[in-house]
């Protein structure tokens, strides 16, 4: 059993904690109300187990040179919370930046005004392309789910939003609808990026121009 330490972050789906005596790992605990919601509506008995299986499956669908960009998921285990209660958590790699600190999200990085290389953005585009080509069902591709390891290396987290979560949207199983959904999410991310950084790298600027054209031609 792992023991929780300091809270790292809190998102729409749950909370992420450091682990005591395990500096290379962290734990993601889904919110209780979401566990109940997806059990009753979608038949998912364990969100942590569901995300673990999706994370490993998605990573396996990518070519070997891109697989290291995905967070390494260790498994699902019991955790002892700081209040003495116990819970179930997804145990995974704690991604650190090149200074040894906890890696920040792409959104936070952009807000800080730090630069990123075109190689960083190209890797983001490569991953997006494989998601579409392989129809991975990863429909939550956004700035909060990309961490910045260094100026050349994005790391991808959060694989909960898949086909079973979108159970009542069966059209997403069709390739065109699948691609449109990921494009829409990525379009929204690009809008945020361009709002934060008007002089975004050329590879993103070029894609943004193409997507604007596609957007108005639909």
Image (tube, grey):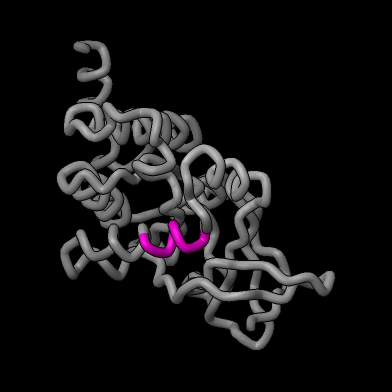
Q: Is residue 47 left or right of residue 175?
A: right
Name the outermost residue toward the bottom: 21
Residue 78 or residue 44, whichever sits in front: 44
Q: Position of residue 104 (x, y in %)?
A: 54, 59
Q: Say whether residue 82 is left or right of residue 111.
A: right
Q: Nearer the viewer, residue 79 or 198?
A: 79
Residue 49 part of the magenta-drawn span: yes
Quadrant occupied by the C terminus: top left
Would residue 101 be counted in the magenta stretch? no
Q: Is residue 150 above or below residue 39?
A: below
Residue 62 at what x, y percent from top left?
20, 60
Drawn side of residue 78 relative to residue 184, left or right? right
Q: Position of residue 114 (x, y in %)?
A: 49, 53
Q: Magenta region: which residues?
A: 48-53
How many tags in the picture?
0
Inspect this view and state whether residue 206 appears: no
Whether residue 196 can be seen here: yes
Q: Which residue appears at 26% of the width and 46% of the height?
A: 128
Residue at 56%, 75% in the rendered image? 77
Q: Residue at x 63, y 83 (%)?
A: 1
Is 134 above or below relative to 63?
Answer: above
Residue 138: image location, x then y, percent: 34, 45
């Amino acid at each position: 059993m792992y023991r929780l330490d300091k809270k790292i972050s809190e998102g729409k789906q749950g909370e992420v904690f450091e682990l005591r005596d395990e500096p290379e790992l962290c734990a993601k605990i889904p919110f209780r109300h979401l566990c109940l919601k997806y059990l009753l509506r979608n038949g998912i008995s364990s969100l942590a187990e569901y995300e673990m299986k999706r994370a490993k499956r998605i990573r396996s669908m990518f070519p070997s040179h891109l697989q290291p960009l995905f967070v390494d998921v260790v498994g699902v285990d019991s955790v002892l919370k700081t209040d003495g209660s116990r819970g179930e958590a997804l145990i995974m790699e704690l991604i650190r930046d090149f200074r040894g600190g906890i890696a920040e999200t792409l959104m936070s990085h952009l807000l800080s005004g730090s630069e990123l290389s075109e190689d960083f953005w190209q890797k983001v585009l490569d991953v997006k392309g494989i998601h579409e080509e392989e129809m991975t069902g990863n429909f939550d591709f956004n700035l909060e789910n990309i961490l910045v390891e260094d100026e050349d290396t994005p790391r991808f987290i959060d694989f909960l939003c898949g086909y079973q979560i979108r159970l009542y949207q069966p059209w997403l199983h069709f390739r065109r609808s699948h691609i449109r959904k990921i494009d829409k999410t990525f379009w929204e991310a690009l809008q945020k990026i361009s709002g934060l950084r008007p002089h975004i790298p050329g590879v993103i600027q070029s894609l943004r121009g193409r997507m604007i054209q596609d957007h108005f031609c639909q």
